[in-house]
Image: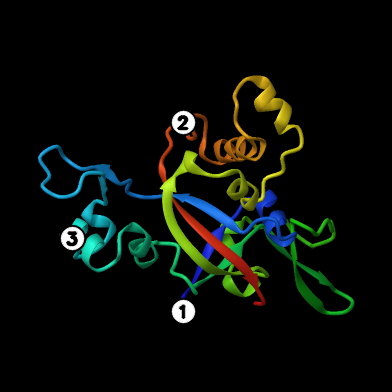
Amino acid sequence: MKERPILFTGPMVRAILDGSKTQTRRIMKPQPEPTPADYPGTAGHWWPSNIVQSMVHVEQELQSKHGGWKGFCPDVCPHGRIGDRLWVREAWARTHVAQAMAEWIVYREGDNRTDYGGPWKPSIHMPRWASRILLEIVSVRVERLQDISEADARAEGVTIEDQHMRGYCAGEFLPPSIRAYRDLWESINGAGSWEANPWVWVVEFKRVTP
C-alpha cells in the first residue's frame, strides 16, 4: 500500500467531509490515441508506450495478461491502485494562543476562525502531517469524460440546485447532476474542456480514519 497526496478545491473538500463525494476524475496524460490504419492488432485505442515504462506491446499485454482495460487500469493509474491511500491537501493555517502556549492547525473549509495568527497557506504547501482527510481507493477505471452517468455525477459531490431549469428546460438536455458536473469541470479545467471530452481516470474512494 502506498500513500499519495491529492488536491481538491474547497467545495470538493466540503463534499468529502459531508460524505457526498466518493469519486474523482483526472485527465489521462498522455491521452490514448486511435490505432493507425495499418495496425495489425485490434482496432480501437492504444496507450502510448510512455504511459507504461518498458512496455512495448501494449495491445498484447492488455489481451494476454490484464484482461483488457479494466484489468490494466489499476496497474498503471498514476493516482494509485486499489487499496492505496490518498491524503488530501487543502488550504490551512497554524493558530496559537500565546497565553496557553498551544498551537494547532485550522482549515479554511469548515473553520471560519479569524484569529489563526497568519494568512491561509495554499493547499499545495500542506505537509502530510497537517492533513486531516485520508481516502482509500476502492476502484480505478478509464472512460471518456462525457460518459459520466447521473449517479456518478452525484458521486462527484456536485449540488444541482437550479440545474433542472438550466439543463433540460434550457434546451441542453443534460440531466441535472451531469450539467452541474460539467459546470464544475469547466470551472477547474477551463472553457471548452468539457467539449474536448478527454479520456479520464475515474478513481472511486472511501474515507478512512487517518
**Residue 24 placement, left or right of 154:** left
Tag 2: amino acid: Glu
Residue 60 tag number: 3
Name the secondary structure under disc 1.
loop
Residue 205 tag number: none
- Could you give the CA–CA distance between mark 3 and mark 2, rounded to whole angstroms? 32 Å
Residue at image position (35%, 50%) is 29
Name the secondary structure under disc 2.
loop
Q: Earlier in the sequence, mark 1 or mark 3?
A: 1
Q: Residues within 10 Å of mark 3 (few under 14, many from 20)?
A: some
Q: Residues within 10 Å of mark 1 (few under 14, many from 20)?
A: few
**Residue 43 placement, left or right of 203:** left
Tag 1: amino acid: Met
Q: Which of marks 3 and 2 is nearer the N terminus?
A: 3
**Residue 131 placement, left or right of 69:** right
Between label 1 and label 3, give the one nearer the viewer: 3
Residue at image position (61%, 57%) is 123
The residue pinned by badge 2 equals 195
Residue 1 tag number: 1
